[in-house]
Image (cartoon, grey):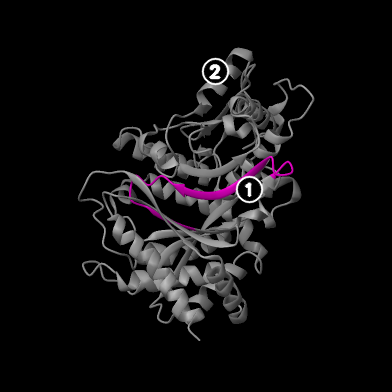
Amino acid sequence: MAWSQVSAHRWERPGDGLENYFALIASLSAAACNGRRHYTIFTKLQLELDIPVTEVEASLKKAWTQLRYEQPQIATVHNGTTKVYEVPDETALQAWVTSTVITSAAANAEDLYATITPIAQATLYYLPASSQLVLRTPHETIDGIGVIRLLDRLLSILVSPPTENITFGDEPSRLAPTLREILGVAEQPTPEELERVMALYKPYMDYAPGIGPVSNLGNRPAGQSQHARLDIPTRTTEAIIQACKAKGITVTSAVHAAYIQTIKKHADPDHPSCHYVNTAQFNLRPYLPKHGAQYTASLGYTLFPVHLESPNSFDQTAQALNRFYRTTFANDPSKLPLVPHMTDILFAVTQSPEYQKGPVPRDAIPSSLGIIEKYMQRSYGTNRLIIRDFMLGVDVVMGMNMLLMSTFRDQLQLVYSFNDAYHEPEHIMQYLQGIVEVLTEELLAN
């Protein structure tokens, strides 16, 4: 599944299971909903710039060009199940820059989000009126941690551009390989590996969709994708962190458990279930060989089934999730080679008419980005550029919501990406507020 040169300027490789899964979901939503692509990642930064306004656009374009040279994956497209990269001549390069670096007259990122059109490649927006930078990326190209690392490199280039000239032509050597290639995993699983994979998926196949709130999915056409956001004050965030440490659990486990407790209170009475069934998100970069972790513009993570039967108390749920998050890969290296086979099966199942006609989970998929400063600085170039605010969400077109949790500038941030045709915005805010209420009651009340 390595990259191969198929013509003078064109390189191709087969997509892996997760890339193909995200590309398929995006194409299904695009076909049904006027080109809108589910799971497109939306990231915004609030910047304080010590760069003349008249120079920002040109500087961004130069930095973006340099970034493509270093991380050419940002200029790939997914064609069916094939990933494609074209080495540009000068005309093609300028056309790419013009189409993927956009200076917007929108008042702010929220206004921009309400009017932007679908994309096929990573696209950068500069908003002079609000001094914001927005990056939109197809999920088949990159994951959330990758986006943050990509922005870190972009901003580093912006304040301190390399002095040497670049000539495109050798950058295909830096295209990201598949996870299967990085790990050296065979194309087909052994019978024993297949048995393990199917056992891991069995609870999801048996019980999904599980506990979830009321949703209008299936009863209405898609509306607008939205991001509900709740920031937890610094002192409360610190108190939550310390309480989690005292209990020996991660903040991710605590927030996830609080979310489960919250959606139990708001569970759809027409779809009763005692099973919590979802997928957890694992950043695999810490477990990859060194050469595999260097590809910023790539999918360096995986989905992994999680199942809890009758999750009762917050403490029990948090401890169970904590064991799951901490031990799934860290304590069992044999699971890592299963991931390419698992994502191949995920893609195969998603293609089936039975899956596409089946019920969609009504709850959100939790995803932790962790401490953002692990991947992106607060400032660059001796305060020539300061990041005052950060937010990441995904476009939700077909109803599969996301709950993203992160910490930036010592504040815990919760972002719930949803579609307003299926969920009322005030209900989503109730879920976010419910998470904070559970965390406060269970961790800070005493």
> How far from the left and from the top, in percent, is residue 218?
23, 50
Q: Is residue 296 visible?
A: no
**Residue denoted by label 2:** 95
Q: Nearer the viewer, residue 104 or 330?
A: 104
**Upstream in the sequence, badge 1 or badge 2?**
2
Point out residue 200 in the picture as x, y percentages from the top left corner. 50, 64
The residue labelled by disc 1 is 186
Type of amino acid at the residue the image marks with label 1: Ala
**Which residue does the image show at 38% across and 78% down from the upper left?**
310
Image quarter in which the N terminus is found: top right
Q: Does the magenta segment cover residue 384? A: yes
Residue at image position (28%, 44%) is: 223
The magenta segment: 380-404
SS under mark 1: loop
Do labels 1 and 2 touch, CB within 8 Å? no
**For residue 352, which numbered disc appears in the image?**
none
